Image: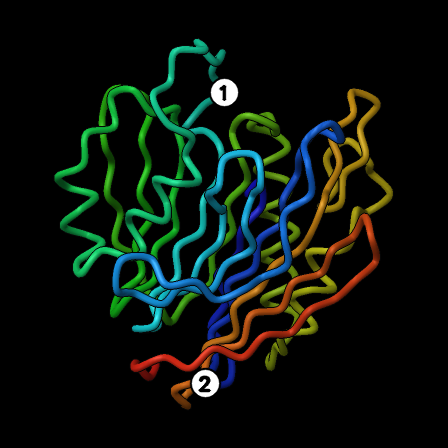
Amino acid sequence: MCTVSFISSGGQRFITSNRDEHIDRPMALRPQEETIGSVKVLFPKDPKAGGTWFAINENGSVAVLLNGGFVGHPPNGKYERSRGPVLLDIVVSDNPLALLQEIDLLRIEPFTLVLYTAELLEFRWDGHQKYFRPLNKDKSYIWSSSTLYQDKVIEHRQTLFKKFVKGNSFITSQDVVDFHSNNHDDFENGFIINRASGLKTFSVTQAILNKESDVVMRHFDLLNKVDYEVPFSTGQLIN
């Protein structure tokens, strides 16, 4: 939920997320399918709040959360709900985009959401206002959490990402995981962090979308050194 990339390559699309948390926070449960309302959803569950930062629904929609909007913010401690359950509300909606337009977020902490449905969307909530930015799903993008990384660091990460994409004419899902797993000898601001404050990268999670109707979620639990690969049947092909 602190580094997210979207890559389109070779007829496939990869959405990949690094989850950075304080070591006092419990580990997420392994990715499992649940039915919420009448919608099947695959996600790794956060046992603390019952939500998630990364979810795929049965229609092939993918929603990934990052903490913070545009800039870092001091938490005010008066939030009504955690952002993880809000993400689940969005991904199980019949129309996630319409729900984002309608939902009341005034008592929700700022966040950024990458939403892939028939289209690709970047959504930001800064605590006061909503921002919608349609993106080209045939291009590649990276996001870094504004709560953990300074602007210069975010720019440096974007530069590394652009070099990675331009330097590889054909990118595989494992190439993307390897990129997300490289800290570039920087445990403070690399893609895998281990800060003296107790912040660590807990996991790397990836959705692989291709021309078939099945999506694959890969989840790498870095603390316990366990990897999961879960196929998930959906009703939507990528286009």
- Quarter placement of the C terminus: bottom left
Residue 174, by quadrant, is: bottom right
Instruction: Pick whichever, 194 or 144, lies toward us.
Output: 194
Q: Give the CA separation, mark 2 to mark 1.
A: 36 Å
Instruction: Pick whichever, 151 or 97, lies toward us.
Output: 97
In the image, residue 149 above or below residue 101: above
In the image, residue 60 above or below residue 82: below
Query: In the visual, does 177 lie left or right of 2?
Result: right
Q: Please report whichever mark, 2 or 1, sits nearer to the chain's N-terminal start.
A: 2
Label 1 amino acid?
Answer: Gly
* Residue drawn at the location 52% of the way across and 74% of the way down: 208
Task: For mark 1, give the secondary structure.
Answer: loop
Instruction: Pick whichever, 186 or 145, lies toward us.
Output: 145
Task: For mark 2, give the secondary structure.
Answer: loop
Label 2 amino acid?
Answer: Gly
Q: Residue furthest right?
A: 185
* Residue drawn at the location 66% of the way across and 38% of the way down: 20
* Residue drawn at the location 25% of the way across and 54% of the way down: 134
- Quarter placement of the N terminus: top right
Q: Residue furthest bottom?
A: 212
Position in image of residue 17 (x %, y %): 57, 53
Location of mark 1 (residue): 72
Query: In the visual, does 173 lie left or right of 125?
Result: right
Q: How is the image coloured?
A: rainbow
- How many C-alpha atoms fall within 10 Å of the one at disc 2: few (<14), some, or many (≥20)? few
- How many C-alpha atoms fall within 10 Å of the one at disc 1: few (<14), some, or many (≥20)? some
Instruction: Pick whichever, 160 or 224, lies toward us.
Output: 224
Location of mark 2 (residue): 11
Query: In the visual, does 173 lie left or right of 189?
Result: left
Residue 115, by quadrant, is: bottom left
Position in image of residue 101 (x %, y %): 15, 41
Residue 132, by quadrant, is: top left
